[in-house]
Image (cartoon, rainbow, N blue to C red):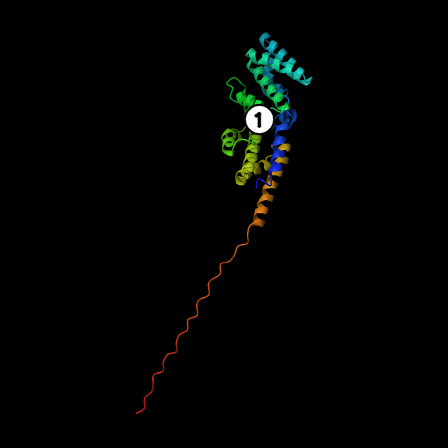
Amino acid sequence: MVDKNDALSREIDEELRREKLEKLWEQYGTYVLGAAATLVLAVGGYQVYEQRKKSFAAENGARYDAAVTLIEQSKTDEAQKALSEVLASGHAGYASLAQLQLAGIHLKANRPQDALAVFEALATSPSADADIKTFALLQAAALRLGQADFTELQNRLKPVAEGSTAWRFQARELLGTAAFKAGKFDDARAQLTPLLADPETPRAALDRIQLILAAMASADAGKTAAAPAATVPQTPAKEQTSTPPAETPAQGGK
């Protein structure tokens, strides 16, 4: 199956990894590969900005804003240095945002393994905001779609997929995509089909889900068409046994 659908799998992987953060977050976010600036407002951003009123937070906020400006100016080396200073400051809120920005820099530079390491560390950080940790977990899972086996991704994503947060849509889509890539069509349909009927499922996700479901239907139809026709076993003909004619008793005359 999967041979026939490798191109589709790669296309979906690429889209999951390259959609812009701003668009994804508005749709409850899928798998970000761009700048993380929108998260300042979307994930606990209000609290972060409130803390900036304090001198310590304001200092780190200025460093973070300067780093973002450098990223926008494509001054990557300087931006990384500035982000490292934010990380070293110990301010949990800005440190998390700085990690997301670093991951984005790695991804833009085609260093997915470096980005994965950042997301993995952030997903398990004891000081990071819960939403940012979940976001990082989904990012790491998206980057591992082509590497990890289905069971590993299932163990990671199932708690989020079965939860009630806005991230459940992305977790279910990732699980369904992982199952599809593993050839586990029943598992894929179990995750993806309910999303089609959920009015809160992001539009971009719906398009990908429909592509995957169509690909599975096509693969199933191909298997059915390629299956050899069932042959009806022939019942062996019974051997004809010749019964010797009964002897007619001789009639003796008197």
Q: Quadrant of the N terminus?
A: top right
- Amino acid type, callout 1: Gln
Nearer to me, 61 or 195: 61
Image location (x, y in percent) of residue 39:
61, 21
Which residue lies most toward the left here? 254
Which residue lies most toward the bottom here? 254
Q: Is residue 137 left or right of residue 37?
A: left
The residue identified by callout 1 is: 139
What kind of element bears circle 1?
A: helix
Q: Residue at x 62, y 31 (%)?
A: 14
Nearer to me, 150 or 44: 150
Q: Quadrant of residue 74?
A: top right
Image location (x, y in percent) of residue 210:
62, 38
Q: Is residue 158 left or right of residue 22?
A: left
Q: Quadrant of the C terminus?
A: bottom left
Image location (x, y in percent) of residue 54:
59, 8
Q: Quadrant of residue 140?
A: top right
In this rendering, the count of numbered labels is 1
Q: Is residue 130 visible?
A: no
Image location (x, y in percent) of residue 62:
63, 11
Which residue lies most toward the top here? 55
Q: Quadrant of residue 139?
A: top right
